[in-house]
């Protein structure tokens, strides 16, 4: 059994990850959100805020993997998540950032995603950063991975594709450790 904490569980991408993860009976999900969920199903739900260190420290207890899918003050949230993980001894994190965070000049809308990426890369944790292109609702699993330092290619990728990739890491957490990856449709 793998205990997986999904931070930002109300987001559209997180909901796709949850739906895909539900096909794996050995994934035990804890859903961390600021609001009550209608789609919680059998999963444990923690109502909390990623800007509140105590909420995160409570949520980290007993977790094996943390999946981060947020918007807002990502530098502060990222720092809180890293600190809570370190305090609880949780090592594995997968965080969703954005395509374009290494372009110069950096667009203002992408600054929080770059800040989150920098915080997690400097954390010393076993991380995987995902930098997806735009999301679609296409009912397909079709994606390519481009590592950091190579030109980002491809196009808008389905939420279902990203969920497939993320759940692959849930299943085999040793995959893509230290990876900072663009995920897009070929």
Image: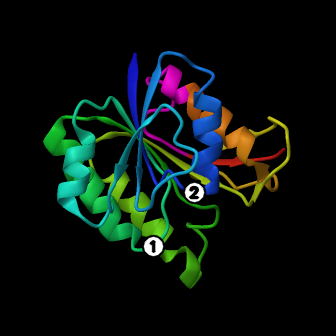
The quadrant of the image that shows the C terminus is top right
Relative to 160, 85 lies left or right: left
Look at the image and tell me whether residue 106 can be seen. Answer: no
Q: CA distance from mark 1 to mark 2?
A: 12 Å
From the viewer's side, name the closer residue of 67 and 112.
Answer: 67
Q: Which residues are magenta?
A: 169-180
Question: Looking at the rendered structure, which numbered label has been put on residue 95?
Answer: none
**Spot occupied by residue 122 in the image (x, y as percentages of width and height):** 30, 53
N-term mark: 1 or 2: 2
**Spot occupied by residue 15 in the image (x, y as percentages of width and height):** 61, 46
Please name the residue shown 30% across and 69% down the image. Answer: 76
Please name the residue shown 55% across and 74% down the image. Answer: 110
Is residue 46 inside the magenta stretch? no
- Crowdedness near tag 1: few (<14), some (14–19) or many (≥20) residues, C-alpha within 10 Å: few
Helix, strand or loop status at disc 2: loop
Look at the image and tell me whether residue 111 can be seen. Answer: yes
From the viewer's side, name the closer residue of 89 and 23.
Answer: 23
Q: Which residue has dot 2 on it?
A: 11
The picture quadrant where one finds residue 135 is bottom right
Q: Label 2 near label 1: C-beta < 8 Å?
A: no
- Crowdedness near tag 2: few (<14), some (14–19) or many (≥20) residues, C-alpha within 10 Å: some
The quadrant of the image that shows the N terminus is top left
Relative to 35, 22 lies left or right: right
Please name the residue shown 32% across and 58% down the image. Answer: 48
The picture quadrant where one finds residue 139 is top right
Relative to 44, 14 lies left or right: right
The picture quadrant where one finds residue 125 is top left
Relative to 129, 1 lies left or right: left
Q: Which residue has dot 1 on it?
A: 72
């Amino acid at each position: 059994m793998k205990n997986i904490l999904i931070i930002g569980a109300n987001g559209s991408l997180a909901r796709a990850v949850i739906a895909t993860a539900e096909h794996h009976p050995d994934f035990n999900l804890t859903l961390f959100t600021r609001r009550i969920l209608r789609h919680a199903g059998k999963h444990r739900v923690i109502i909390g805020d990623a800007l509140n260190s105590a909420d995160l420290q409570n949520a980290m207890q007993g977790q094996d993997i943390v999946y981060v899918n947020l918007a807002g003050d990502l530098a502060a949230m990222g720092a809180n998540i890293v600190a809570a993980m370190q305090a609880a001894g949780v090592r594995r994190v997968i965080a969703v950032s954005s395509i374009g965070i290494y372009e110069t000049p950096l667009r203002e809308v992408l600054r929080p995603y770059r800040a989150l990426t920098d915080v997690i890369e400097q954390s010393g944790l076993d991380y995987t950063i995902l930098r997806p292109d735009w999301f679609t609702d296409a009912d397909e699993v079709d994606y390519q991975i481009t590592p950091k330092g190579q030109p980002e290619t491809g196009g808008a990728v389905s939420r279902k594709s990203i969920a497939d990739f993320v759940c692959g890491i849930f299943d085999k957490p040793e995959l893509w450790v230290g990876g900072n990856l663009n995920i897009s449709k070929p």
